[in-house]
């Protein structure tokens, strides 16, 4: 009987939470229904405007070219990282070694390349810019240069004319090739620049030595030196020249070769052998006796002969090294390979009109929903005397008028 007298739970008491949820959802539906014109009309209006706007936008075409830049084949750092295997990424990050493609991307984005392209395609007139800096900014905005994990650099240029888009993309590659001929960006080009400076100095020294000998002949201050003395002087000067050039060669190799590099060790051993041979020659002949050399005039002649022979030896050997360096640089420069040359695209890349319209309609729909709830909340707040007073106070505080 006690069980029978126990009051059974009422539906509203046991499912109160569900009823509250149902009521709140109904309230939301009522709010949206009250503002159905706004929820339908605003997205429809915005959609029509977006369609008209997108149709007025010009078609943009993208010319794309892919290149494989020269690789640093002689870099000691690259060789060390290659030997480390999976740890190369960690060590490279600690050592500050970056992707070598970043260098070429920086060159492609340089002001020098931009100015060349502006002059080549008369972009000041095309972009309708008064200042060169404005044209550079417009060109940079239309150009997208990136590098993938595979080391391939992609150059994409946007333009209203598909042919111009392809031509500018291909012109970037041409200007990059020209710039690498001027700047020493590869190991081979750095060696070429190093040997070029040394060769120019050797050429200057040889010119001075020849001029000194010519002046001595004109003044009649050159004495004859016997055959044995002449051969000894020439041999000594030749060895000194070879030693000087070998020092230059080792200095150039040290810029990229590790201490244990076989070529570097061999060059160092050859330098030691040349120095030993020079010591033997000069140890046997030492300084020539003034009487044997023909007195003071003879010593002057020996000095002129030694300087001239030394300068000739250094000049000849450095000329050979310089030519080899230029050949190596030419090989590296030719490694700028165009994988995909840009061609005029047959389809536009943008604008994506359907996406513009869809996003505009969705954004306006959510704005309409937000405005509906705000409007409904303000309407209810005005009906409550307490809330209405707070709204009036808020309006007064936000007003710019002084009261």
Image (cartoon, rainbow, N blue to C red):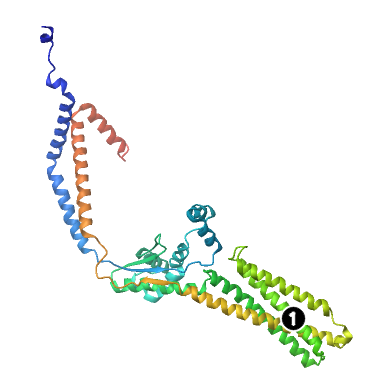
Rendered image quadrant of residue 119: bottom left
**Residue drawn at 16 percent across, 21 percent down:** 14
- Answer above or below: position of 234 versus 29: below
Rendered image quadrant of residue 49: bottom left
- Answer above or below: position of 156 versus 89: below
Q: Nearer the viewer, residue 65 or 350?
A: 65
Secondary structure under tag 1 reads helix
Q: Nearer the viewer, residue 47 or 9?
A: 9
Q: Quadrant of the N terminus?
A: top left
Q: Nearer the viewer, residue 160 or 186?
A: 186
Q: Which residue is mark 1?
A: 237
Q: Residue furthest top?
A: 1
* Residue 244 visible from this viewpoint: yes
Q: Is residue 67 left or right of residue 87?
A: left
- Where residue 277 sits: x, y (%)? 75, 76
* Residue 221 visible from this viewpoint: no
Q: Is residue 241 left or right of residue 385?
A: right
- Where residue 52 sits: x, y (%)? 18, 60
**Residue drawn at 60 percent across, 77 percent down:** 321
């Amino acid at each position: 009987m006690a069980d029978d007298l126990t009051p059974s739970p009422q539906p509203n008491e046991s499912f109160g939470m569900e009823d509250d949820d149902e009521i709140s959802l109904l309230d939301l539906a009522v709010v949206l229904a009250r503002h159905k014109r706004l929820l339908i009309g605003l997205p429809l209006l915005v959609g029509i405007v977006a369609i008209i706007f997108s149709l007025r936008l010009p078609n943009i075409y993208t010319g794309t070219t892919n290149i494989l830049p020269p690789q640093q084949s002689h870099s000691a750092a690259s060789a060390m990282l290659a030997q480390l295997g999976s740890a190369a990424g960690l060590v490279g990050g600690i050592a500050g070694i970056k992707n070598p493609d970043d260098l070429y991307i920086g060159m492609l984005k340089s002001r020098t390349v931009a100015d060349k392209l502006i002059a080549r395609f008369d972009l000041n007139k095309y972009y309708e810019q008064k200042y060169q800096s404005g044209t550079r900014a417009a060109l940079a905005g239309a150009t997208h240069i990136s590098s993938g994990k595979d080391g391939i650099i992609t150059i994409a240029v946007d333009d209203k004319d598909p042919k111009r888009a392809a031509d500018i993309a291909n012109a970037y590659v041409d200007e990059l090739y020209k710039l690498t001929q001027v700047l020493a960006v590869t190991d081979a080009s750095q060696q070429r620049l190093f040997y070029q400076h040394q060769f120019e100095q050797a050429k200057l020294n040889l010119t001075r030595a020849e001029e000194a000998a010519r002046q001595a002949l004109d003044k009649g201050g050159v004495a004859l030196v016997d055959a044995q003395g002449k051969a000894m002087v020439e041999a000594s000067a030749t060895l000194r020249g070879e030693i000087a050039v070998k020092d230059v060669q080792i200095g150039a190799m040290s810029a990229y070769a590790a201490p244990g590099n076989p070529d570097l060790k061999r060059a160092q051993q050859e330098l030691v052998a040349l120095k030993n041979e020079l010591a033997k020659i000069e140890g046997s002949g030492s300084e020539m006796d003034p009487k044997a050399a023909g007195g003071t005039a003879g010593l002057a002649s020996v000095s002129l002969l030694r300087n001239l022979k030394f300068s000739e030896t250094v000049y000849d050997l450095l000329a050979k090294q310089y030519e080899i360096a230029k050949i190596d640089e030419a090989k590296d420069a030719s490694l700028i390979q165009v994988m995909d040359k840009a061609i005029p695209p047959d389809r536009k890349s943008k604008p994506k009109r359907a996406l513009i319209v869809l996003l505009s309609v969705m954004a306006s729909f959510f704005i309409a929903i937000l405005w509906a709830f705000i409007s409904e909340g303000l309407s209810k707040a005005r009906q409550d005397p307490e809330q209405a007073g707070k709204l009036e106070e808020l309006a007064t505080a936000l007003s710019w008028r002084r009261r």
